[in-house]
Amino acid sequence: MICRPTCVAALLLRRWRWPFCVTRRIPRWTIRQTADHSKRVESFPMNHLFLKTTAAAMLLGIGFTAVTPGPILADESPALSTTSAPRVAAGSMIAAGQYLVTIGGCNDCHTGDWAETNGDVPVQDWLTGSPIGWRGPWGTTYASNLRLLVRDMSEDAWVTMLKTRADRPPMPWMNVNRLDDNDARAIYRFIASLGVRGERMPAALGPDIEPKTPYFLLEPQPPRRLAAAAAGQDENH
């Protein structure tokens, strides 16, 4: 009995009428030893169906090899095929936004008690801002309540802001400006999904204005001040 794949291959070749699909027996030559120890050449028939089946299997194998795709690498995934810039791929835009907010360090400044709790802050309390200022030669800046900011801003305006804004430290605008548009939209949608919560944070102050709130001092300290502070600690001990 001929197996089904062989029948299919034979039928394909018979239908295509390829040059080697002949209907007669093809001789295969061999040398046989006779009874008187002489040698004579004999022909043994080789069924043409064998040739058809073998050729079909080879051709079908080559065809499958040619069209079988290779493994999809992370940088070649369909989610990244529409742009040359790298961006995050996730099950949803909101999930991608939450991931970007977490690993991008947004909570470090924009979520109260993030550092103090080692990041153990419920998601519903994220990104409501902080009233503790960051003071340096540029003045004093505050981490804004991003949930209120997103409420008052369209998604397109948000993307434009992240791509073009240049402002005072410690916000790393030079890095944020390089964010892919899709990632910027993912962050917007995640923040919007949290809903409105909290109050507005204080406005930024100039370098000559003393803040009325607690603040972190971000400026280089001269060695003599450090030495004096160390000496004072020694005297206290």
Image (cartoon, rainbow, N blue to C red):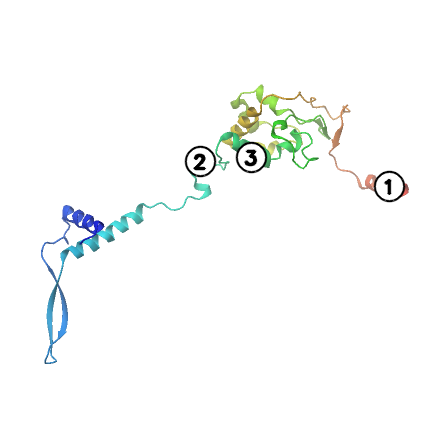
Disc number lying in front (2 or 3): 3
Mark 2 is surrounded, within 10 Å at the Cα level, by few (under 14), some (14 to 19) or many (20 or more) other residues, namely few
| Quadrant of the image occupied by residue 117 | top right
Residue 233 tag number: 1
Sequence-wise first label, 3 or 1:
3
Which residue lies under the disc numbered 2? 79
Mark 1 is surrounded, within 10 Å at the Cα level, by few (under 14), some (14 to 19) or many (20 or more) other residues, namely few
Q: Is residue 223 left or right of residue 182?
A: right
* Residue 208 drawn at (x, y percent): 76, 25
Which residue lies under the disc numbered 3? 99
* Residue 64 drawn at (x, y percent): 29, 48
Sequence-wise first label, 1 or 2:
2
**For the view shown, which residue lies furthest in the front direction?**
1
Sequence-wise first label, 2 or 3:
2
Disc number lying in front (3 or 1): 3
Q: Is residue 65 left or right of residue 163?
A: left
Q: CA distance from mark 1 to mark 2?
A: 58 Å
| Label pair 3/1, CB-CB below 8 angstroms | no
**For the view shown, which residue lies furthest in the top direction?**
152
Q: Is residue 57 left or right of residue 236?
A: left
Mark 3 is surrounded, within 10 Å at the Cα level, by few (under 14), some (14 to 19) or many (20 or more) other residues, namely some
Residue 105 tag number: none
Q: CA distance from mark 3 to mark 1?
A: 43 Å
* Residue 187 drawn at (x, y percent): 55, 29
Residue 46, above or below 232: below
Q: Callout 3: helix, strand or loop?
A: helix
* Residue 108 drawn at (x, y percent): 65, 33
Circle 1: residue type: Gln
